[in-house]
Amino acid sequence: MTDLRLYPFSSLLRRSAAVAILIAVGGTLWGGLVAPLAEELDRGAVEIEQLRDQARRYEAAAARLPAVRRLVAATEQAFAVQPGFATDATPSVAAARLQAELKQLVEANGGTMRLAQELPGTAEQSFSRVGVRVEFLLPSGKLQSVLHAVTARSPFVFLEHVQIRSQESWQQQPGSRAAELPIVVGLQAANYLASRSGR
């Protein structure tokens, strides 16, 4: 048997082996614990910076909010006073006003209103469409002036489904002119008011 004392490890070799073991243990600790932790910390720092950037964008948007609200209010006010649109409080009030104005025009031109009916309102983009269906008896010579008076006013009135026919029971009186021939006119009239949803 060989005596180990004969080949004593030199102190330099022992120290080198101890340093190598420490380096191996340190590398294992670094690879298994410290490096993943450092990577996680880096990812957390990147995420924190992204969240800060997002918070800055939200703060900038919040700072613009009062100006945007003022712009929306100014736009709504401009639409409210813009010619061509009805300014009534509700579609029902606008329809009642439209019926009354049509009746007044027909009667001022020697006609008689036979039917006036409010049509269901519909939303079209940022406006409410208000409509009525009317039928009236009118001397034929007055039709052009009534239709012109209806469509050349503000708020604008749009006519649809216009039907014109002669009165069934009319008999021409001796000496009467063709312009006095009574006709029955049926039509739908509509105008628009700014929608108040969201106000």
Image: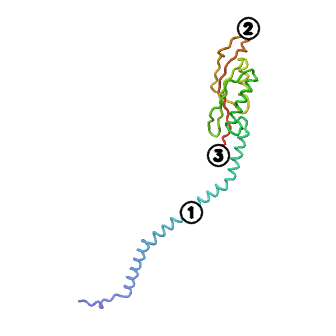
Q: Earlier in the sequence, mark 3 or mark 1?
A: 1
Q: Callout 2, which amino acid?
A: Pro
Q: Callout 3, which amino acid?
A: Gly
Q: Which residue corresponds to mark 3?
A: 198
Q: Are marks 2 and 3 in contact (CB under 8 Å)?
A: no
Query: What's the distance in space between the residues labelled 2 and 3, CA to CA?
Result: 62 Å
Q: Position of residue 65 (x, y in %)?
A: 67, 53
Q: What kind of element bears circle 1?
A: helix
Q: Callout 1, which amino acid?
A: Glu
Q: Is residue 85 left or right of residue 3?
A: right
Q: Earlier in the sequence, mark 1 or mark 2?
A: 1
Query: What's the distance in space between the residues labelled 3 and 1, CA to CA?
Result: 37 Å
- Snapshot colouring: rainbow
Most foreground residue, 74 or 10: 74
Which numbered tag is attached to residue 158? Answer: none
Most foreground residue, 197 or 127: 197
Query: What's the distance in space between the residues labelled 1 and 2, CA to CA?
Result: 95 Å
Q: What kind of element bears circle 3?
A: loop
Q: Which residue corresponds to mark 1?
A: 49
Please tell me whether residue 178 is drawn above or below residue 37 in the rendered image. above
At 72% from the left and 40% from the top, the residue drawn is 80
Q: Which residue corresponds to mark 2?
A: 174
Report the mark closest to the observer, 2 or 3. Answer: 2
Q: Position of residue 18 (x, y in %)?
A: 39, 83
